[in-house]
Amino acid sequence: MCTYETTYAVMDGSAKGPNSGWFHVTDATVYFDHPVHAMAEHTLNIDFTDPAKGPGARVALELSAESARELIRAVQAALDAVPAALTA
């Protein structure tokens, strides 16, 4: 069952996709739906984009729910491991 629940976030970072150079990332779209490529019924899908640069400025992730939760834990652990002054 699809919920069509989609979350958007403003980003400030960089991404690099296959056969492309680095580009500025300004947006993230996050939703739980059918994947395009991953071999699963549903995945957490994250698209990092710069809409101003067109559809080629995109990096997409399709993660199982378990992998998505592990990524959240790893990101939080990495941020918690450095002095707060470095993340301000």
Image: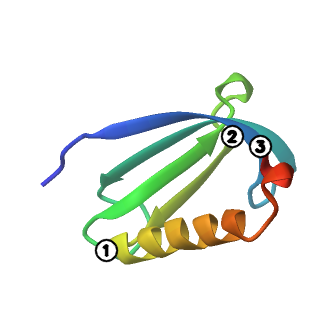
Provide the secondary structure element on which disc 2 rests: loop
- How many marks the image carries: the answer is 3
Residue at x 43%, y 70% (from the top left corner):
69
Residue at x 77%, y 43% (from the top left corner):
13
Residue at x 64%, y 27% (from the top left corner):
51
Q: Mark 1–mark 3 contact, CB under 8 Å?
A: no
**Vertical order, 70 against 34 (above or below):** below
Q: Earlier in the sequence, mark 2 or mark 1?
A: 1
Provide the secondary structure element on which disc 1 rests: loop
Whole-percent x and y of residue 54? 67, 29
- Relative to the observer, which residue lies in front, 25 or 70? 70
**Vertical order, 64 against 16 (above or below):** below
Residue at x 69%, y 40% (from the top left corner):
56
Q: CA distance from mark 3 to mark 2?
A: 16 Å
Q: Earlier in the sequence, mark 3 or mark 2?
A: 3
Mark 1 lies on residue: 40
Q: Amino acid at mark 3?
A: Gly
Q: Amino acid at mark 1?
A: Ala
Q: Mark 2–mark 1 contact, CB under 8 Å?
A: no
Image colouring = rainbow
